[in-house]
Each structure stands twice: as C-alpha cells, then as structure tokens.
Image (spheres, rainbow, N blue to C red):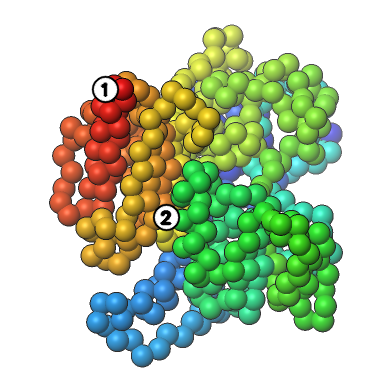
C-alpha cells in the first residue's frame, strides 16, 4: 500500500471541497484533494443549473401560452421534449466542464481519485491502495437523493434529482414526492412543459414557506398548474404494466391511489457520511452517524476534522457551501500550524425557490408563538409593476422586534430573488425597518412593493408603542 502524508486532507471536490483546498493552500498548508467522482459539483451537474435550465424552457412555453392577456395571439405552442432536454444537457455539461477545467489546474500530486475512509482520527485509506496521514481533514462529501422505502422497487420508472436530467424525453405523467425547493420547482416546470403532474408531500408546507397565509396562497397558485396534495403519505408503490400505482393516504386519513408513468423522489438529500468510517475517528456522533460540529468554525468535536457544505446538512445551499469551505480550509491550516481557529458570524439564513412566482425565506424563521415580534403582510395583487407584467400573484410577510430591528421574513411573488437579497443584506447590516425605508427605490419596480411592506411594518410598530 502506498504511504502518503499531508497537512490537510480534503474529502470531496465539490463547491465546499474546492474552496477548502484552495483556502488551505493559500494559508501555506500542504493539501490533498480526494474525489471519488464524477465531480463537477452538485450545483452544476444535478442541482442549481440543470433545474434552472428546465425552468427556463418551461417559462418560455408558459409565457407563449399566456400572450392573450397582452392582446398578442399565438396560435399554438408545441413542446419538443427531446430538444428541451438536449439543450439542458448541453448547457449543463458546459457548466460542469468549467468546474472540471478548474480541478484540472490543481497540481496532479495534490489530487487523489477514489473512495476515502477513515482508519482513525489522523489516517485515511483510499480505495484500499493509499494510506494518507493528515494533520487535519475536511469532510466535504456532499449529499445524495433520498429514496423512500416504498419506491425502491420501481426500477427505471423511478427518477431522482440525480437522474431526471438524463431522460431522453419528457414523461407523459409524473408523480413528484416532496414539495420542498427542488420538488416544487420540477413539478411546476414539468407541468408547464405538458407533463401531467401529481405532487404529494407528507408535511403542510410548500417551497420552504411556513407562514400560514403564504402557504395557503402557494397551494392555491400551484394547484392551478398541477394536482397537489399536502399531508399525503405514500404507503406503497408498484408497477402495473407501463404505469406505476401509488397507494397513499390523504390528510384526512382516507386511502387514495394514483397511476402515473413515472415517479420523481424529491424527498431531500441526506449528507454522504455513512461510508466514511467516522466511528473510528473519536468524533462525537449522533444516532444517525452525524458528527457534532461548530457551525461557525466547522470544527467537529473529538478530532482535528472539519465538515463543510452539504455534508454537514446545516445549510445545503451553494453560497453557504462556498463560504463554509473557505472557513474550513483556513481553520484546518490553523489547526495544523497550532494557531487558533476563526469562528466568523454566520450569514443570515437565505433560501430561494425559483418557481413562478418565486419563494424565499430570510433570517429567523416564522414563529406563531413569538410574543416579542411585530408582523406585517402585503399582497402583490395590486403592486404596480407586477400588475403591468401580469405576474401579480403572491404576497410577503416580515417580522421585526418592537424596536424596529428586522428579524426575518418569507416571500412569494415576482422578483423575490432580488427582494430577498435586499432583506438578507439588511439583516447582515442589522438595519431597522426605519433605516431600510430611508433608501432610494426606483419607480416603477417591484422593489416598491417591499417599501409598501416596510411602511406597514412601521405603522404597526408605532401602533404598538401607542398601546
């Protein structure tokens, strides 16, 4: 067996792993990057980018069908499924290729291909061929799609978020299990491309929204495009000829069944940690085998090991993975050099869903029991710019402290990808809603809707002060 040593071993060459490797090297550490493949990052290969390519095609079809609202007559719209998916993969492969080109620039001696497993808190073995001693290690192994037990015998009738972008043509019908960000995005996109979609979720939320009014509004909006069932629990699934029959119970406990050509499991992406041998490291592990770690420094309890990105399951979003990788890389180098680690403040929570209308959650989560919050709401129904473009659906909700400090919010509407980033930056800068109002907002823009909401919040704060 080949014997090697390094200061920092980085397991995984995705967004977090690449950032970690580069940060460790920049701090002077001898770093080795280990990748079992296929590489290219989750975002570029099976996540953010291919899903947005599908959404873009679906939005083009949807807008073409809706031009009558503007007095523009389009006689017919035909979706060429193979062409849609061919373009998706071509552009997806371009994004992946850019990532792989970056990896190829890393010195060959710093890269090891294979499956890494811990032998102890300072040693890895890779594919049974290389033993690597390290001063500190970073787990950046990403995540993989979960497949609920009832679906595991469906063979090629089952898609996951890793496989759906490889299909040669659009399916005639599709059941989507899970209405989180990925599930609801793909459900709407497929429906707009002409697929008959039924979406089921065992919970009572959609697209990460939890504020009851926005959840109800989202259910109303999305159910106009595909069949939607919240509180639905799948009990069984079997192939029946060319179809799949799902047996499930609805929110009232009544037994139901649905027949579709294919099923998409969008039930989350658990971290890839089960085959790393973490039980040999001395780390503090929970009942699911996840190590305890500090979300600021990313250092795990019990060994000089850090965990970053989707692998820690804390905030599985690209911008967080990139920042966490950088922090982990610098802190791993610090551990090896005997320097104190850094524990920078975490960024405000920010999650987006690129449906139409878009959805986002920012900052502290909604809490109906909180008594020290002031809540304000607004609707996009009559917002000027949104109504002009016939995208006037949804609403927004903010919550603030009695002194006006913004705490968080949820949004469902047009241009939410921009509005939520304004809110996130305001939270990062600890602005009050009064300070936010003292900012220029151009007319006519959807951003004016945010000012409407801030005005409502200020009025509620003033009312509360007057008692």
- Say left or right for 336 vs 28: right
Image height check: is 88 above or below 310? Answer: below
Q: Is residue 453 left or right of residue 161?
A: left
Q: Looking at the image, is 411 positioned above or below residue 334?
A: below
**Dot 1, how many residues are within 10 Å of its Cα: few (below 14), some (14-19), or many (20+)?**
few
Q: CA distance from mark 2 to mark 1?
A: 36 Å
Q: Earlier in the sequence, mark 2 or mark 1?
A: 2
In the rendered image, residue 199, in percent from the top left (x then y), is placed at 62, 64
Task: List the residue tagged with mark 1.
Answer: 466
Label 2: which residue? 358
Compare residues 208 and 456 and report the one nearer the observer. Answer: 456
* In the image: residue 450, left or right of residue 29: left
Residue at 42% in and 61% down: 356
Residue 464 vertical position relative to residue 339 in the rendered view, above or below = below
Q: Where does the C terminus fall, quadrant-wise?
A: top left
Question: Which residue shows up at 63% across the image and 68% down it?
Answer: 198
Which residue of the protein is positioned furthest toward the bottom in this rendering? 75
């Amino acid at each position: 067996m080949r014997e090697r040593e390094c200061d920092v071993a980085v397991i995984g060459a995705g967004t977090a792993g690449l950032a970690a490797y580069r940060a460790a090297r920049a701090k002077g550490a001898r770093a080795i990057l280990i990748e079992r493949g296929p590489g290219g990052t989750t975002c570029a290969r099976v996540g953010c980018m291919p899903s947005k390519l599908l959404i873009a095609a679906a939005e083009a079809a949807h807008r073409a069908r809706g031009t009558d609202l503007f007095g523009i007559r389009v006689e017919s719209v035909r979706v060429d499924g193979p062409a849609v998916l061919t373009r998706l993969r071509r552009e997806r492969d371009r994004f992946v290729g850019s990532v792989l080109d970056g990896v190829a620039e890393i010195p060959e001696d710093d890269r090891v291909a294979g499956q890494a497993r811990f032998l102890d808190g300072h040693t890895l073995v890779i594919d049974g061929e290389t033993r690597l001693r390290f001063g500190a290690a970073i787990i950046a192994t990403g995540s993989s799609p979960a497949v609920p037990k009832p679906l595991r015998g469906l063979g090629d009738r089952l898609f996951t978020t890793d496989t759906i972008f490889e299909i040669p043509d659009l399916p005639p019908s599709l059941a989507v299990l899970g209405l989180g960000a990925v599930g609801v995005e793909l459900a709407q996109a497929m429906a707009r491309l002409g697929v008959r979609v039924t979406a089921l979720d065992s919970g009572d939320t959609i697209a990460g929204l939890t504020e009851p009014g926005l959840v109800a509004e989202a259910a109303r909006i999305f159910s106009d495009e595909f069949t939607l069932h919240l509180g639905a629990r799948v009990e069984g699934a079997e192939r029946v000829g060319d179809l799949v029959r799902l047996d499930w119970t609805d929110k009232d406990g009544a037994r139901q069944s649905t027949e579709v050509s294919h099923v998409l499991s969008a039930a989350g992406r658990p971290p890839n940690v089960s085959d790393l041998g973490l039980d040999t490291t001395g780390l503090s592990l929970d009942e699911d085998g996840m190590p305890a770690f500090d979300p600021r420094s990313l250092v795990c309890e019990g060994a000089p090991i850090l965990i970053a990105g989707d692998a820690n399951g804390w905030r599985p979003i690209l911008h967080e993975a990139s920042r966490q990788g950088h922090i982990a890389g610098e802190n791993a180098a610090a551990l090896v050099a005997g320097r104190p680690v850094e524990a920078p403040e975490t960024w405000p929570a920010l999650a987006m869903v690129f449906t139409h209308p878009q959805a986002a959650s920012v900052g502290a989560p909604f809490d109906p029991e909180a008594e020290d919050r002031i809540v304000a709401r607004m609707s996009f129904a009559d917002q000027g710019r949104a109504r002009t473009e016939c995208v006037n659906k949804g609403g927004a909700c903010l919550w603030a402290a009695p002194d006006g400090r913004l705490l968080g919010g949820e949004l469902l509407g047009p241009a939410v990808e921009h509005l939520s980033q304004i809110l996130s930056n305001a939270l990062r800068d600890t602005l009050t809603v009064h300070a936010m109002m003292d900012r220029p907002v151009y007319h006519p823009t959807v951003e004016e809707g945010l000012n409407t909401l801030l005005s409502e919040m200020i009025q509620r704060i003033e009312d509360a002060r007057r008692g």
